[in-house]
Image: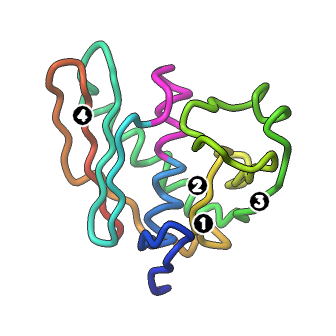
Amino acid sequence: METPILNEHNKQEYPPMHSAEHLINGEIDRRYGCGRAFSAHIERKKSKLDYRLPKPLTDDELRSLEDYVNAAINADVDVTEEYITQQEAMSRFDMSRLPEGASDTVRVVHIGDYDQCLCAGTHVKHTSEIGHFRISSSRYHDGVQRIVFRLD
């Protein structure tokens, strides 16, 4: 396993966990139209994501998400990046999290055909480096679905 990397904001990141977060975030947005997580805490041992949803996800829906992420991992697709202008990005991505004063060029991370999003973080080079994805718990309260996941 890779060691964590310090990014330009001195935030420690663990590439396999961060890449897994991209996969589940993209799929939840596609399935439920809720956008990517509005709150995320990504750590080496376990991570959590919060989404605004009208109702809680069922056990079957959670298992289906888990199966989807593991299928993407097992597909061993490349994780690549491209650089585009903010102007071009506006037509493809939610720009609300882009920091004020960001450069005119932004980075897009692609995980095969599974996900693409703006990101300044560190990632694996191939999904097979992520490991086995497991949703370890979830809860729903006041319109917020929290998903906690681990990599085994």
Residue picked out by circle 3: 81
Dots 4, 2 in contact, CB < 8 A: no
Dots 1, 2 in contact, CB < 8 A: yes
- Between circles 4 and 3, the one closer to the viewer is 3
Q: Residue 77 is drawn in which quadrant?
A: bottom right
x then y, percent, for residue 28: 47, 33
For marks 4 and 3 on the same chain, the one whose residue lies earlier in the sequence? 4
Q: Is residue 4 left or right of residue 60?
A: right
- Between circles 4 and 1, the one closer to the viewer is 1
For marks 3 and 1 on the same chain, the one whose residue lies earlier in the sequence? 3
- Label 2 sits on a secondary structure element that is helix
Residue picked out by circle 1: 127
Q: Residue flagged by tag 4: what amino acid is it?
A: Asp
For marks 4 and 1 on the same chain, the one whose residue lies earlier in the sequence? 4
Q: Residue 96 is drawn in which quadrant?
A: top right
Q: Residue flagged by tag 2: what amino acid is it?
A: Ala
Local packing at callout 2 (Cα closer than 10 Å; few below 14, some 14-19, many 20+) is: many
**Which residue is depicted at the point 41% across and 37% down?**
37
- Label 1 sits on a secondary structure element that is helix
- Between circles 2 and 3, the one closer to the viewer is 3
Q: CA distance from mark 3 to mark 1?
A: 14 Å
